[in-house]
Amino acid sequence: MEYIVSKKRLLKILIFGIFTIPLVSFSQYTDVINSNRPGLSVSAYAIGTNVLQAEFGVAYEQQDHSKLATESNIFGADLSLRYGLLFETLELNYEGTFDNQNKTYTNTGVEITNTDFSRNRIGLKFLVYDPFKNPENNKPNLYSWKANYGFKLKNLIPAVSVYAGANFVLGDNPFYRGDPTVSPRVMLATQSRLTPRFVLISNIAYDRLGTDFPEWNYTVSLSHAFRDPKWSVFVENQGIKSDRYADVLLRGGVAHLLGENMQVDMNLGASFKNTPSRIFASMGFSYRIDMHRDKVKAIEDQKAGENGGPINKNAMKKKKKGKNKGTGAEDIDLGPTKKQLRKLKKKERNRDDSEIDF
Protein backbone atom coordinates (compact mmCIF):
# COMPACT_ATOMS: atom_id res chain seq x y z
CA MET A 1 0.00 0.00 0.00
CA GLU A 2 1.42 3.38 -1.03
CA TYR A 3 0.69 6.64 0.72
CA ILE A 4 0.74 9.63 -1.64
CA VAL A 5 2.04 12.04 0.96
CA SER A 6 5.10 14.26 0.85
CA LYS A 7 6.99 13.45 4.05
CA LYS A 8 8.81 16.77 4.15
CA ARG A 9 5.61 18.69 3.44
CA LEU A 10 3.65 16.81 6.14
CA LEU A 11 6.36 17.44 8.71
CA LYS A 12 6.61 21.14 7.85
CA ILE A 13 2.84 21.62 8.09
CA LEU A 14 2.58 20.02 11.54
CA ILE A 15 5.63 21.76 12.97
CA PHE A 16 4.47 25.09 11.52
CA GLY A 17 1.03 24.51 13.03
CA ILE A 18 2.44 24.00 16.51
CA PHE A 19 4.26 27.30 16.62
CA THR A 20 1.72 29.47 14.80
CA ILE A 21 -1.45 28.55 16.68
CA PRO A 22 -2.41 31.37 19.09
CA LEU A 23 -1.33 30.58 22.61
CA VAL A 24 -4.12 30.17 25.16
CA SER A 25 -3.90 30.70 28.90
CA PHE A 26 -6.38 28.28 30.44
CA SER A 27 -4.98 25.71 32.82
CA GLN A 28 -4.66 21.97 32.26
CA TYR A 29 -3.10 21.33 35.64
CA THR A 30 -4.95 18.87 37.88
CA ASP A 31 -4.60 18.27 41.62
CA VAL A 32 -4.13 14.53 40.99
CA ILE A 33 -1.47 12.91 38.79
CA ASN A 34 -2.59 12.16 35.22
CA SER A 35 -0.39 9.41 33.77
CA ASN A 36 -0.30 8.00 30.24
CA ARG A 37 0.27 4.57 31.75
CA PRO A 38 -0.67 1.73 31.80
CA GLY A 39 -1.29 1.83 28.03
CA LEU A 40 0.75 3.33 25.19
CA SER A 41 -1.79 5.94 24.15
CA VAL A 42 -0.89 9.57 24.81
CA SER A 43 -3.31 12.04 26.40
CA ALA A 44 -4.22 15.15 24.44
CA TYR A 45 -3.64 17.31 27.53
CA ALA A 46 -0.36 18.58 28.93
CA ILE A 47 0.45 18.15 32.64
CA GLY A 48 0.73 21.86 33.52
CA THR A 49 3.62 24.27 33.79
CA ASN A 50 6.53 23.41 36.08
CA VAL A 51 5.30 19.86 36.67
CA LEU A 52 7.92 17.12 36.23
CA GLN A 53 6.50 13.62 35.86
CA ALA A 54 8.23 10.24 35.51
CA GLU A 55 6.44 7.11 34.29
CA PHE A 56 8.47 3.92 34.66
CA GLY A 57 7.69 0.30 33.83
CA VAL A 58 9.21 -3.17 33.49
CA ALA A 59 7.94 -5.73 31.00
CA TYR A 60 8.32 -9.31 29.83
CA GLU A 61 7.36 -10.60 26.37
CA GLN A 62 7.27 -13.99 24.69
CA GLN A 63 7.67 -13.54 20.93
CA ASP A 64 7.66 -16.47 18.49
CA HIS A 65 7.87 -16.29 14.69
CA SER A 66 6.47 -19.30 12.80
CA LYS A 67 8.05 -18.49 9.42
CA LEU A 68 11.48 -17.56 10.73
CA ALA A 69 11.39 -20.43 13.24
CA THR A 70 12.48 -18.26 16.15
CA GLU A 71 11.55 -18.05 19.80
CA SER A 72 12.36 -14.94 21.81
CA ASN A 73 12.24 -13.89 25.44
CA ILE A 74 12.35 -10.14 25.90
CA PHE A 75 12.93 -8.29 29.16
CA GLY A 76 12.50 -4.55 28.97
CA ALA A 77 12.30 -1.32 30.93
CA ASP A 78 10.62 1.83 29.72
CA LEU A 79 10.74 5.40 30.95
CA SER A 80 8.74 8.49 30.04
CA LEU A 81 9.75 11.90 31.35
CA ARG A 82 7.21 14.72 30.95
CA TYR A 83 7.62 18.38 31.75
CA GLY A 84 5.13 21.27 31.44
CA LEU A 85 7.09 23.83 29.49
CA LEU A 86 6.56 27.61 29.29
CA PHE A 87 2.75 27.58 29.23
CA GLU A 88 -0.12 25.27 30.14
CA THR A 89 -0.72 23.80 26.70
CA LEU A 90 2.87 22.75 25.91
CA GLU A 91 4.64 19.61 27.11
CA LEU A 92 8.17 18.31 26.56
CA ASN A 93 8.30 14.52 26.51
CA TYR A 94 11.07 11.91 26.40
CA GLU A 95 10.19 8.24 25.83
CA GLY A 96 12.68 5.41 26.03
CA THR A 97 12.42 1.61 26.05
CA PHE A 98 15.50 -0.54 26.59
CA ASP A 99 15.12 -4.23 25.67
CA ASN A 100 17.20 -7.35 26.16
CA GLN A 101 16.13 -10.01 23.64
CA ASN A 102 17.28 -13.63 23.81
CA LYS A 103 16.43 -15.19 20.43
CA THR A 104 16.72 -18.88 19.56
CA TYR A 105 16.54 -20.31 16.02
CA THR A 106 14.68 -23.57 16.57
CA ASN A 107 15.94 -25.19 13.33
CA THR A 108 19.63 -24.78 14.15
CA GLY A 109 19.68 -24.16 17.88
CA VAL A 110 21.64 -20.96 17.39
CA GLU A 111 21.08 -18.36 20.11
CA ILE A 112 21.72 -14.64 19.82
CA THR A 113 21.19 -11.70 22.16
CA ASN A 114 20.08 -8.23 21.08
CA THR A 115 20.33 -5.41 23.58
CA ASP A 116 19.51 -1.80 22.78
CA PHE A 117 16.77 0.84 22.67
CA SER A 118 13.64 -0.25 20.84
CA ARG A 119 12.23 3.23 21.50
CA ASN A 120 14.27 6.37 22.04
CA ARG A 121 12.60 9.66 21.18
CA ILE A 122 11.92 13.19 22.34
CA GLY A 123 9.26 15.66 21.26
CA LEU A 124 6.87 18.51 21.99
CA LYS A 125 3.09 18.18 22.35
CA PHE A 126 0.82 21.19 21.99
CA LEU A 127 -2.92 21.40 22.73
CA VAL A 128 -4.77 22.89 19.76
CA TYR A 129 -8.38 22.70 20.96
CA ASP A 130 -10.09 22.04 24.30
CA PRO A 131 -13.90 21.66 24.38
CA PHE A 132 -13.85 22.42 28.11
CA LYS A 133 -12.05 25.74 27.74
CA ASN A 134 -15.26 27.72 28.28
CA PRO A 135 -16.81 26.69 31.64
CA GLU A 136 -20.09 28.40 30.70
CA ASN A 137 -20.72 25.68 28.12
CA ASN A 138 -20.08 22.89 30.61
CA LYS A 139 -22.02 23.89 33.69
CA PRO A 140 -23.60 20.99 35.63
CA ASN A 141 -27.35 20.50 35.48
CA LEU A 142 -28.66 21.09 39.01
CA TYR A 143 -31.96 19.35 38.27
CA SER A 144 -30.87 16.10 36.61
CA TRP A 145 -28.34 13.50 37.74
CA LYS A 146 -28.74 11.69 34.41
CA ALA A 147 -27.94 14.84 32.46
CA ASN A 148 -24.63 15.17 34.30
CA TYR A 149 -23.54 11.52 34.29
CA GLY A 150 -25.14 10.18 31.13
CA PHE A 151 -23.79 10.18 27.60
CA LYS A 152 -24.33 13.28 25.45
CA LEU A 153 -23.48 13.71 21.77
CA LYS A 154 -21.39 16.81 22.51
CA ASN A 155 -19.10 14.60 24.62
CA LEU A 156 -17.80 13.09 21.38
CA ILE A 157 -16.14 16.41 20.55
CA PRO A 158 -12.52 15.76 21.55
CA ALA A 159 -9.64 17.80 22.81
CA VAL A 160 -6.99 17.83 20.09
CA SER A 161 -3.23 18.15 20.30
CA VAL A 162 -0.36 17.85 17.83
CA TYR A 163 3.07 16.36 18.43
CA ALA A 164 6.39 16.76 16.64
CA GLY A 165 9.58 15.03 17.67
CA ALA A 166 12.43 12.80 16.60
CA ASN A 167 13.71 9.24 17.02
CA PHE A 168 17.34 8.63 17.86
CA VAL A 169 19.30 5.52 16.84
CA LEU A 170 22.67 5.53 18.53
CA GLY A 171 25.40 3.20 17.31
CA ASP A 172 24.67 -0.15 15.67
CA ASN A 173 21.15 -0.79 16.94
CA PRO A 174 20.08 -4.39 16.08
CA PHE A 175 16.39 -3.39 16.13
CA TYR A 176 16.82 -0.65 13.49
CA ARG A 177 19.73 -1.62 11.26
CA GLY A 178 20.41 0.92 8.54
CA ASP A 179 18.25 3.66 10.04
CA PRO A 180 19.71 7.18 10.25
CA THR A 181 20.72 8.59 13.60
CA VAL A 182 17.76 11.00 13.66
CA SER A 183 14.35 10.54 12.05
CA PRO A 184 11.26 12.76 12.53
CA ARG A 185 7.96 11.69 14.11
CA VAL A 186 4.59 13.49 14.00
CA MET A 187 1.32 12.61 15.74
CA LEU A 188 -2.25 13.76 16.25
CA ALA A 189 -3.82 12.98 19.65
CA THR A 190 -7.48 13.33 20.62
CA GLN A 191 -9.28 12.83 23.92
CA SER A 192 -13.03 12.70 24.59
CA ARG A 193 -14.73 12.50 27.99
CA LEU A 194 -17.72 10.38 27.03
CA THR A 195 -19.08 10.47 30.61
CA PRO A 196 -17.46 11.49 33.91
CA ARG A 197 -16.16 7.90 34.18
CA PHE A 198 -15.36 6.99 30.56
CA VAL A 199 -12.53 8.57 28.56
CA LEU A 200 -11.68 7.78 24.93
CA ILE A 201 -8.19 8.54 23.60
CA SER A 202 -6.92 8.08 20.05
CA ASN A 203 -3.49 8.65 18.51
CA ILE A 204 -2.44 8.60 14.85
CA ALA A 205 1.30 8.81 14.24
CA TYR A 206 3.59 8.84 11.21
CA ASP A 207 6.93 7.59 12.47
CA ARG A 208 10.53 7.32 11.24
CA LEU A 209 10.07 9.71 8.34
CA GLY A 210 12.92 9.67 5.84
CA THR A 211 14.00 6.10 6.61
CA ASP A 212 13.64 3.02 4.38
CA PHE A 213 10.84 1.81 6.64
CA PRO A 214 8.46 4.65 7.59
CA GLU A 215 5.67 3.55 9.90
CA TRP A 216 2.00 4.40 10.39
CA ASN A 217 0.70 3.75 13.88
CA TYR A 218 -2.72 4.17 15.49
CA THR A 219 -3.80 3.63 19.10
CA VAL A 220 -7.34 3.73 20.51
CA SER A 221 -7.83 3.47 24.28
CA LEU A 222 -10.97 3.44 26.44
CA SER A 223 -10.62 4.01 30.21
CA HIS A 224 -13.20 3.60 32.96
CA ALA A 225 -13.01 4.86 36.56
CA PHE A 226 -14.83 2.90 39.28
CA ARG A 227 -17.01 4.35 42.03
CA ASP A 228 -13.83 4.40 44.07
CA PRO A 229 -11.93 6.85 41.82
CA LYS A 230 -8.59 5.47 42.97
CA TRP A 231 -9.19 2.47 40.70
CA SER A 232 -9.52 2.46 36.92
CA VAL A 233 -9.33 -0.04 34.06
CA PHE A 234 -8.62 0.32 30.35
CA VAL A 235 -8.68 -1.58 27.07
CA GLU A 236 -6.51 -0.55 24.14
CA ASN A 237 -6.11 -1.45 20.47
CA GLN A 238 -2.92 -0.64 18.56
CA GLY A 239 -2.20 -1.02 14.86
CA ILE A 240 1.21 -0.83 13.16
CA LYS A 241 1.79 -0.62 9.39
CA SER A 242 5.32 -0.73 7.95
CA ASP A 243 7.32 -2.74 5.44
CA ARG A 244 9.54 -3.81 8.32
CA TYR A 245 6.75 -4.85 10.71
CA ALA A 246 2.96 -4.80 10.74
CA ASP A 247 0.64 -5.98 13.50
CA VAL A 248 -2.54 -5.41 15.48
CA LEU A 249 -2.23 -5.57 19.28
CA LEU A 250 -4.76 -5.68 22.07
CA ARG A 251 -3.97 -4.87 25.70
CA GLY A 252 -5.85 -4.19 28.91
CA GLY A 253 -5.00 -3.39 32.48
CA VAL A 254 -5.70 -1.65 35.74
CA ALA A 255 -4.30 1.43 37.54
CA HIS A 256 -4.45 2.39 41.22
CA LEU A 257 -3.87 5.83 42.68
CA LEU A 258 -1.63 5.72 45.77
CA GLY A 259 -1.76 9.46 46.40
CA GLU A 260 -2.10 12.76 44.62
CA ASN A 261 1.32 12.31 43.02
CA MET A 262 1.72 8.51 42.75
CA GLN A 263 0.14 5.73 40.68
CA VAL A 264 0.85 2.02 40.14
CA ASP A 265 -0.42 -0.07 37.23
CA MET A 266 -0.23 -3.34 35.34
CA ASN A 267 -1.36 -4.57 31.92
CA LEU A 268 -1.47 -7.68 29.73
CA GLY A 269 -1.59 -7.93 25.95
CA ALA A 270 -1.23 -10.07 22.85
CA SER A 271 -1.08 -9.92 19.05
CA PHE A 272 -3.51 -11.36 16.50
CA LYS A 273 -1.03 -13.21 14.29
CA ASN A 274 1.90 -15.63 14.48
CA THR A 275 4.49 -13.77 12.42
CA PRO A 276 5.37 -13.10 15.15
CA SER A 277 2.98 -14.08 17.92
CA ARG A 278 3.34 -11.83 20.95
CA ILE A 279 2.23 -12.19 24.56
CA PHE A 280 3.40 -9.54 27.02
CA ALA A 281 2.88 -8.19 30.50
CA SER A 282 4.01 -4.98 32.19
CA MET A 283 4.00 -3.33 35.62
CA GLY A 284 4.66 0.33 36.22
CA PHE A 285 4.88 3.27 38.56
CA SER A 286 4.22 6.96 37.93
CA TYR A 287 5.36 9.86 40.11
CA ARG A 288 5.26 13.61 39.71
CA ILE A 289 7.10 16.50 41.31
CA ASP A 290 4.50 19.24 41.54
CA MET A 291 6.04 22.72 41.27
CA HIS A 292 3.01 24.23 39.59
CA ARG A 293 1.91 27.72 40.62
CA ASP A 294 -1.17 29.46 39.27
CA LYS A 295 -0.37 32.71 37.53
CA VAL A 296 -1.66 35.81 39.30
CA LYS A 297 -3.85 37.96 37.05
CA ALA A 298 -4.46 41.63 37.79
CA ILE A 299 -8.07 42.54 38.59
CA GLU A 300 -8.30 44.92 35.65
CA ASP A 301 -7.21 42.07 33.32
CA GLN A 302 -9.86 39.64 34.53
CA LYS A 303 -12.98 39.08 32.47
CA ALA A 304 -16.15 40.75 33.66
CA GLY A 305 -18.90 38.54 35.02
CA GLU A 306 -16.64 35.79 36.41
CA ASN A 307 -16.31 37.22 39.91
CA GLY A 308 -19.47 39.26 40.46
CA GLY A 309 -18.99 41.71 37.59
CA PRO A 310 -16.50 44.45 36.78
CA ILE A 311 -14.93 46.54 39.53
CA ASN A 312 -14.94 50.28 39.00
CA LYS A 313 -11.68 52.16 39.30
CA ASN A 314 -12.89 54.32 42.26
CA ALA A 315 -15.09 51.69 43.88
CA MET A 316 -12.96 51.49 47.04
CA LYS A 317 -12.67 55.24 47.62
CA LYS A 318 -14.56 56.77 50.55
CA LYS A 319 -17.60 58.62 49.36
CA LYS A 320 -18.19 62.25 50.39
CA LYS A 321 -21.15 63.11 52.59
CA GLY A 322 -24.24 64.27 50.75
CA LYS A 323 -23.05 62.72 47.51
CA ASN A 324 -24.62 59.31 48.06
CA LYS A 325 -27.23 58.72 45.40
CA GLY A 326 -28.15 55.27 46.65
CA THR A 327 -26.57 51.88 46.06
CA GLY A 328 -29.60 49.66 46.33
CA ALA A 329 -28.88 48.71 49.97
CA GLU A 330 -31.29 51.39 51.21
CA ASP A 331 -34.21 49.12 50.32
CA ILE A 332 -32.96 46.37 52.67
CA ASP A 333 -33.69 46.39 56.45
CA LEU A 334 -30.22 46.05 57.93
CA GLY A 335 -31.35 46.67 61.57
CA PRO A 336 -30.34 49.49 63.95
CA THR A 337 -26.82 50.87 64.03
CA LYS A 338 -24.68 50.85 67.18
CA LYS A 339 -25.44 54.54 67.70
CA GLN A 340 -29.17 53.88 67.47
CA LEU A 341 -28.90 51.00 69.95
CA ARG A 342 -27.11 53.24 72.48
CA LYS A 343 -29.87 55.83 72.21
CA LEU A 344 -32.57 53.15 72.72
CA LYS A 345 -30.84 51.79 75.83
CA LYS A 346 -30.46 55.29 77.27
CA LYS A 347 -34.13 55.98 76.68
CA GLU A 348 -35.10 52.72 78.42
CA ARG A 349 -33.06 53.65 81.52
CA ASN A 350 -34.71 57.08 81.74
CA ARG A 351 -38.23 55.71 81.46
CA ASP A 352 -40.63 55.99 84.48
CA ASP A 353 -41.29 52.49 85.78
CA SER A 354 -44.92 53.47 86.50
CA GLU A 355 -45.51 54.28 82.86
CA ILE A 356 -47.60 51.66 81.10
CA ASP A 357 -47.19 50.93 77.44
CA PHE A 358 -50.28 50.16 75.37
Image (tube, rainbow, N blue to C red):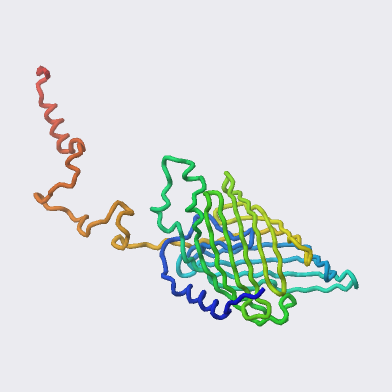
Q: Is residue 153 above or below residue 115?
A: above
Residue at position x 43%, y 47% in the image: 140
Residue at left offset 40%, top offset 63%: 295
> Where in the figure is residue 327, as x and y percent of width and height?
18, 47
Point out residue 186 in the picture as x, y percentages from the top left corner: 57, 73
With 174 as the anchor, is 168 left or right in this view? left
| Residue closest to the eye, 41 or 67 | 67
Residue lying at the far right in this picture: please name it.
108
Q: Quadrant of residue 222?
A: bottom right
Left or right of residue 134, residue 225 in this image: right
Q: Pick whichever, 210 or 182, lies toward us.
A: 210
Q: Quadrant of the C terminus?
A: top left
Count of numbered tags:
0
**Location of residue 322 in the rendering, given as x and y in whole percent from the top left corner:** 9, 49
Which image quadrant is residue 205 in? bottom right
Quadrant for the N terminus, please: bottom right
Q: Is residue 29 left or right of residue 7?
A: left
In the displayed structure, 339 sits above or below 181; it is above
Which residue is at 56% across, 54% downward? 199
Identify the image quadrant of residue 182.
Answer: bottom right
Say which residue appears at 59% left-offset and 50% top-offset.
224
Q: Position of residue 33 (x, y in %)?
A: 55, 57
